[in-house]
Image (cartoon, grey):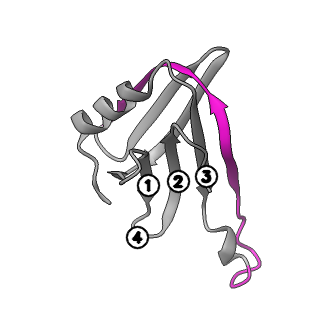
Amino acid sequence: MESVHIQKVQEAINNFANKDVFLHLETTNGAYASHIDQKFFSAGAYIRNALVQYEHGKITGNGPFRVGLKINLGWVYAEGITHYEIDEQGRLLLAGHDYTGKLAVALEISTTPFE
């Protein structure tokens, strides 16, 4: 993955608009760290292979970035995006890493289901 290049990410987001796409969205603040510190409050969210169609999407901010996708009845968004990749299957993979390099958020868009 490489650091976000806002224009390249926006172009990739635009390429998936108005198509049936599969989303993977995951957040964590260190859910696996609670075994080290029992007072640590962990939280996260996870959805995989949600089939949606978005009207338009937008990447905003100065870094870390926010990506929002306008779907029929609302929005899907991920905040804290720092890196991206368009993989060999043409999927847009977005990730946000914390200051220690650990994954904090992932938003992935594909025309085929994620395995």
- Does the magenta run of residues contain 42? yes
> Which quadrant, please, contains the C terminus?
bottom right
- Residue at the spot x=31%, y=31% of the render? 10
Q: Amino acid at mark 1?
A: Gly
The numbered mark, 3 or 2, whose residue comes first in the sequence reads 3
Label 3 secondary element: strand
**36 horizontally vs 29: left or right:** right
Q: Which residue is mark 1?
A: 96
Is 74 on the left-hand or right-hand side of 77? right
Mark 2, other Cα within 10 Å: few <14 / some 14–19 / many ≥20: many
Q: Which residue is mark 3?
A: 26
Task: Give the CA distance from mark 2 to mark 1.
Answer: 5 Å
**Residue 38 drawn in magenta:** yes
Quadrant in which the N terminus is drawn: bottom left
Specify the segment rendered in magenta: 35-61
Q: Do the CB atoms of the residues marked 1 and 3 lie less than 8 Å apart?
A: no
Q: Nearer the viewer, mark 4 or mark 3?
A: 3
Mark positioned earlier in the residue sequence (4 or 3): 3
| Residue found 43% across the figure and 28% down from its top | 16
Q: Which mark is residue 105?
A: 2
Q: Is residue 14 above or below residue 24?
A: above
Q: Residue at x 72, y 76 (%)?
A: 34
Q: Are marks 3 and 2 in contact (CB under 8 Å)?
A: yes
Looking at the rendered structure, the secondary structure element under dot 2 is strand
Do tag 2 and tag 1 residues touch (Cβ < 8 Å)?
A: yes
Say which element carries label 1. strand
- For marks 4 and 3, give the CA distance: 16 Å
User: Which residue is pictured at 70% across the width and 71% down the height?
Assistant: 40
Query: Residue 101 has which mark?
Result: 4
The amino acid marked with disc number 4 is Gly
